[in-house]
Every structure is written in structure tokens, then in C-alpha cells.
Amino acid sequence: MAKILIVGCGSIGTQLAEVLTAKGHQVVGLKRNPPVFDLITGIDYFKADISASETLKALPLDFDFVYFIVSPDGRNQESYEAIYKAGVNQLLAHFSKAETPPQWFFISSTSVYGQTQGEWVDENSLSYPENRPSQLIRLAEQRLIALNAQHVIVRFSGIYGSGREYLLRIARQVPAIQQDPPYYTNRIHQTDCVGVLVFLLECRLAGIGLESCYIASDDDPAPTWEVMSWLAERLSCSIPSVKAMAQDALMNKRCNNERLKALGYQFNYPSYKDGYAKLIADSLAQISAQDVPTLKGASFK
């Protein structure tokens, strides 16, 4: 079994830690403000701010693998630099002292692609983002691979799932959406985010050769108009209004996941329809449960 450090134990990191711990791996979660010990999952935590080297001094060096799953505090250059520049640099400097530095699974984003015309992109496509936050992610990718070709970059597309119901909230507001030409959205359910990360580790442990980069996005990149109209219908909302074509779109592409599927990964939710159907059903069930009166104090006529 492996000793694994998960840097950034948010929702996905915590779920990943639970799965890996259940499989017998020794997992440590690195957080700025962790619980002392998670009695439910059995996860050990190490308190540190990766952008401050002094907080990493006591971090053990004998990890086999590092998962880097960190979310910036904000959508601004300063927050991204703290994570993808200072944070990555501090961790790499720390583990450079190890006799055998750990292999990384670096969680990136499909925002590193700057295509704007709905092109299909894969791992070999040019990645030239125009916005600075995405450029910082791309620079971190390049540094890791230049340092060790065994490190693996995993580029997630738009993540959704429990606690990530942004599109459902938007659909209820009858938004204005570009219809023609289509503006594509690429998505992945958070269950598959965890599934992909576990799958890649198990491939590595089994001695299966991995590429240096994988796109992790479902099988169904779809026009945003189609997605929002589908959601509105199932939520019994009005369909979106038509928005004039945006002239300044920074990103509009379709993500090809064939490399990941060729390796053998099978998606739990291959389409947004599969994932959002369950999300909507769960939401409605929760609302119904809250509306059921209890016997105490209830009036029946």
C-alpha cells in the first residue's frame, strides 16, 4: 500500500481520502485549518499553508504520491499566484530533499485551452490561455513535467454534483444564453473526479504506463443552450432567452476524453443528463422530505 499526501482536502480531496483510506492506503491531508483527526474517515491531517515555506518544515518526506487539489481563495491573479506559483514551488523545494521524491497527480483545468470557436481539443492540442489565472496553471503544469515526466497532469472540466449546483440555480433564473453559433460547456460529475484519480493511481501501482496528461471530462460536451433548456424543462422553468453572440468569448471548445477512456476508465455519469437527472431527483426528494409534517403538532382533517 502507498503513503499518499493530498494537498487541499476540500470536497473532492476529502472524498478521495475516504476512498483511498478504505482501500488500505495511508493518507495524510494537508490543509490550512484542518480538524485534529477525522474520526469518521480516519484521515490524518497536517496543518500548513503551502505558500509559506516555514509551515512545511515538519512535513514528512517519505510520501509515495502527492495529489495536488487546491482551489484558490479568489478568481484573481494574486490568489492564483499564491497556489500555482508560490505553493507549487514551496512543495517542490520541500520534496527535493527526499531520497526519492514523490510522484505527483496535479489537478489542473481545461481552462488552459484558449480555443474560442468550438474546436475539439485533446491532450496534444495547443494550450495558450489568454487570462492570467489560467496561464499560471499552465506554467505550473510545465514546471512539473519538466522536472519529472512521471508526474501526471489531470485537467478537469466544469465540476458539478452535490454542493455544486450552480447551473441549476442559473436555470431557475431564466438566463439569457447564446444559441447560435453554439457555445459549448464541458462537464464532469464530482463522483467521476474522484473515480478518475483513484483509477490513475491504481494504474500506476499496477505498473501500467501513464501519459503525462489526461483530460477528465464526460462524453457529452454540449451547447450551453441545449444544457440549460434541458435543465429548465426538468425543473419546470421557462426556457432561457436568446442572447446575442458574444464577441469576446475567451474560451469555447469541446473536450475529447478518448485518452482516459482508452486506458480503461468508465464514467459513472457519461453525460450531463445522467448526472443532473440524479441531482435534480435528489433535490426534489429533499424538498419533499422537508415538506412532510410530523405527527407532533400536525393537524389532519
Image: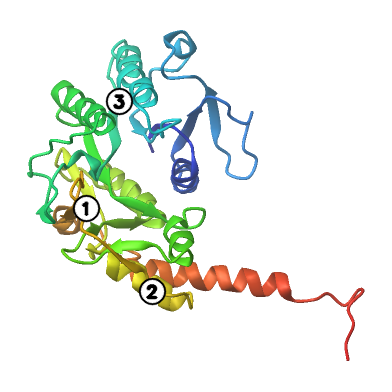
Numbered badge on residue 239: 2
Horizontal side of 237 relative to 69 (left or right) equals: right
Numbered badge on residue 246: 1
Cα separation between marks 1 and 3: 44 Å
The structure residue drawn at horizontal position 58% and vertical position 26%, both measured from the top left corner, is 33
Cα separation between marks 3 and 2: 49 Å
Amino acid on which disc 1 is placed: Ala
Amino acid on which disc 2 is placed: Ile
Horizontal side of 292 relative to 8 (left or right) equals: right
The location of residue 117, given as percent across then percent down, is 11, 53
The location of residue 25, given as percent across then percent down, is 43, 39
- Please tell me whether mark 3 sits on a helix, a strand or a loop: loop
The structure residue drawn at horizontal position 25% and vertical position 34%, both measured from the top left corner, is 134
Is residue 270 something one can see in this rendering? no
Of label 3 and label 2, which has the lower sequence position? Answer: 3
Horizontal side of 210 relative to 283 (left or right) equals: left
Residue furthest right as drawn: 297
Cα separation between marks 2 and 1: 19 Å
Amino acid on which disc 3 is placed: Pro
